[in-house]
Amino acid sequence: MKYDEYDKGILKILYEDSKISNSTLAQKINLSPPATLERVRKLRTNGIIQGQRAILDKKKLGRGLTCFLALQIKHLHRQEAYQRIEEHLKQLEEIEEIYFLTGRIDYLIKANFRDIDEFREFFIAKLSKVQMIERAETFVVVSSAVNPRYNPINVDVKDRDLD
């Protein structure tokens, strides 16, 4: 799908405020509301906009301990084995994100817990049951920050294909 400055403007604004009304969005990019709505629909249909979600305060919800787990997998050299591991990990409700990596570490997992006791229980009762995990290393998040300037839309790039 080809996209232009209007589409980039839409994406940039929606990335910062997904609850903005179509009429306000249209004003900000200098297009009519029907034209803006059609562009947003195309961006959704083509999978560029994949959804909207609320940003929740994990700590206030009782999930104040965030850990990253670096996993090394017994190298079975079969894609099915990695798919099985990933599907198993997706079943564990404590896991927020799963990254398949190159290098010494096969998976980097972001998980959230109430406290260190809940993490220990997760590690013993759930993660250690995954037989293909050869080694696991845990990194406890002490603090984190979000870069307010980050936006995946590069406004300096001219018309491009979004695939």
Image: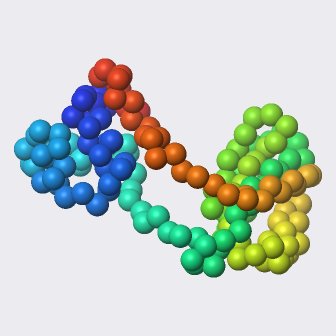
Nearest the viewer among 6 and 57 is 57
Residue 93: give x, y in percent of width and height.
66, 71
Quarter containing the C terminus: top left
Image: 66 above or below 149 = below
The answer to whether residue 128 shows anywhere in this view is: yes
Q: Which residue is found at the position 76% from the left and 48% from the top?
A: 107
Q: Is residue 46 left or right of residue 146?
A: left
Q: Quadrant of residue 87?
A: bottom right
Residue 123 higher or lower than 40, as above or below: below
The spot of residue 35 in percent (x, y) is: 11, 43
- The one of 87 and 8 positioned closer to us in this rendering: 8
Q: How many marks?
A: 0
Query: Residue at the location (82% across, 42% down)?
Result: 105
Q: Quadrant of residue 53?
A: bottom left
Q: Quadrant of the N terminus?
A: top left
Q: Residue 50, position in %: x, y?
A: 40, 51
Most distant residue in the top direction: 158
Q: Image check: 126 left or right of 151?
A: right
Considering only vertical position in the picture, is 81 above or below 88?
Answer: above
Is 149 located above or below residue 83 in the figure? above
Q: Residue, x 12% and y 54% (percent of image)? A: 23
Residue 151 image point, x, y percent: 43, 40
Which residue corresponds to the image point at 24% horizontal and 29% vertical from the top-left?
A: 5
Q: Would residue 94 be visible to someone looking at this image?
A: no
